[in-house]
Amino acid sequence: AKLIDLKTLTDSRGNLTVIEDAIPFGIKRIFYIYGVDNSVRGKHRHRSTTQAAISLRGSCTIYNHDGAKEEEFVLDHPSKCLILYPADWHKMYSFSEDCILMVLASHSFDPEDYIYEPY
């Protein structure tokens, strides 16, 4: 997994964050997660799909294990983007009440692409 900063332009009118030039893959799927209670989401990795996670509002924590290294990332600003590679077994938790987590994916949904067993 890799945390990147998205280019944000700021002036007296507000902020504009640019995504398309920062994402290292073609986007085939977009979804967002919100209204999460104290549940843990995710708990999987992929065979082929790379993802980019951005907290548009609020915050959440993403635990990641890539088979060798374990890390935790806090997404708490819309300019932070976490790139999750296929080998990244991840889970998302500690969602703030107002969190909206948007995920961009390199592949369309395919249940055969998911690996649920942790390392």
Image (cartoon, helix red, strand yellow):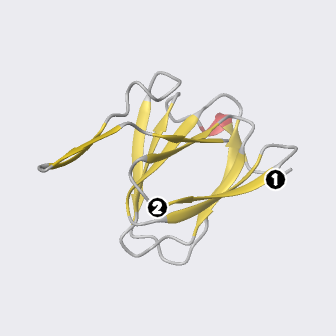
Q: What kind of residue is marked 2? A: Asp
Residue indicated by mark 1: 118
Q: Secondary structure at mark 2?
A: loop
- Where residue 92 sits, quadrant-wise, is bottom right
Q: Residue at x 13, y 50 (%)?
A: 12
Q: Identify which residue, 85 or 81, lies in the foreground.
A: 81
The reply to whether discs 2 and 1 touch (Cβ–Cβ < 8 Å) is no
Q: Residue at x 40, y 76 (%)?
A: 97
Q: Secondary structure at mark 1?
A: loop
- Where residue 19 sits, quadrant-wise, is top left
34 left or right, relative to 44: left
Q: Nearer the viewer, mark 2 or mark 1?
A: 2
**From what the image shows, is residue 101 above or below residue 107?**
below
Q: Identify which residue, 25 or 105, lies in the foreground.
A: 25
Q: Residue at x 59, y 67 (%)?
A: 93
Tell me the number on the disc at residue 28.
none
Location of residue 65 in the rendering, given as x and y in whole percent from the top left corner: 78, 50
Q: Residue at x 49, y 30 (%)?
A: 108
Location of residue 91 in the rendering, given as x and y in whole percent from the top left corner: 65, 58
- Count the labels in the image: 2
Location of residue 106 in the rendering, given as x and y in whole percent from the top left corner: 52, 28
Residue indicated by mark 2: 76
- Where residue 110 sits, quadrant-wise, is top right
Query: Dot 2, crowdedness within 10 Å: few (<14), some or many (≥20)?
Result: many
Query: Residue pushed farthest front?
Result: 12
Mark 1 or mark 2, which is nearer the start of the sequence?
A: 2
53 left or right, relative to 14: right
32 left or right, relative to 119: left
Distance CA(mark 2)–CA(mark 1)? 25 Å
Q: What kind of residue is marked 1? A: Pro
